[in-house]
Amino acid sequence: MIHTDICIIGAGPVGLFSVFEAGLLKMRCHLIDVLPQVGGQLSEIYPQKPIYDIPGYPSIKAQELVDNLMAQIAPFKPTFTLGERVEAINKQEDGSLIVRTADETAVHCQVVVIAGGLGCFEPRKPEIVGLEDFEGRGVAYWVKHPEQYRGKEIVIAGGGDSALDWTIYLADIAQKTTLIHRGETFRGAPDSAEKVFDLATQGKINLVLQSNVVSLHGNGHLQSLVVAGQHKNTSSIKADYFIPLFGLSPKLGPITDWGLNIHKSAIEVNTLDYSTGVERIYAIGDINTYPGKLKLILTGFHEAAMMCQSAFKYVYPDQHLSFKYTTVNGVNAF
């Protein structure tokens, strides 16, 4: 059992900034995200995309913003559970909450904050014969533990940043790395694409373009896959692991079963403090809705600050909250 003051579901920019606001009030945070890294959409979908509406930054790349947020919250020592989906929230007799994930991680806290962006991201699964038969037995939709691929033969499919980045990274870990892409050019960062082409030229990876994986085969565990080329000609490739990286699609998932008021796939909140209809559960960022809602990172930052002021009463019921500016009080860690 993990014990903390606030459990934040979602480690995107709004969830991360909540750690800072909570830390100023001496409240500890544990964050859970279904993605294998922090940053939410910013890191997973468009890490190199410039963002123009963050105060003080005329332009900042999405991943750079995430990195800066991580540096900002580092003094408050947040803890993380990544690559796991929250399944249930159970209320205890004393009013506290226990958050449980599908992987049986349990977090005991006084307050739950849902900062899940557009919801629980689920992988976009390509139409491949036998794909779901080998999930957990050779098929993975993201890289959670890179070392499990050491000395193995792996095949990655996709043409975005994730496919390029993991091909580059795993080229030095796996025995053989193959990248399969249906096009001739990549959607990811040009620098990453250039590195992949260089690795292919050096013989460090196997690059297969204008091709698609059509079927998977094995006995209990993935052993090979069949690839179809531009002219429908097929070939078989030996593989211990297959990692299709075709992006993510947001879904509310188990959130719909938590007794919250949901309207058009968003959680209704009280704009006084962004609390939901369930005591001790708040919702901030793109996951919530209210009259006049703007889906901006900036809006989520404001909601995080207001939420923490309200959450204080559950973490420290016997104390009076006195608001102080950081310019006066500084940023003091625990």
Image: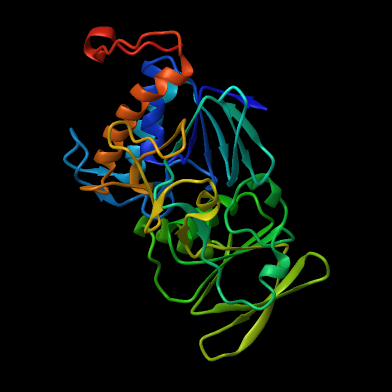
Say whether residue 17 is left or right of residue 233: left
Q: In this view, does 72 lie above or below 294?
A: above
Residue 77 percent across, percent down from the top left: 49, 21
Q: Is residue 144 above or below residue 280?
A: below
Please tell me which residue is depicted at 64% across the width and 49% down the height of the picture: 173
Comparing 313 with 9, the one in front is: 313
Comparing 13 with 321, the one in front is: 321
Q: Is residue 256 above or below residue 112?
A: below
Please tell me which residue is depicted at 41% across the width and 18% down the height of the picture: 313
Instruction: Report the colour scheme.
Output: rainbow
Q: In which quarter of the image is the N terminus?
A: top right
Q: Is residue 56 above or below residue 149?
A: above
Please tell me which residue is depicted at 66% across the width and 71% down the height of the picture: 131
Say whether residue 43 is left or right of residue 133: left
Residue 172 percent across, percent down from the top left: 61, 50
Comparing 283 with 92, the one in front is: 92
Please tell me how many numbered marks the rendered image carries: 0
Question: To which quarter of the image does residue 215 belong?
Answer: bottom right
Residue 301 percent across, percent down from the top left: 29, 34
Residue 255 percent across, percent down from the top left: 51, 49
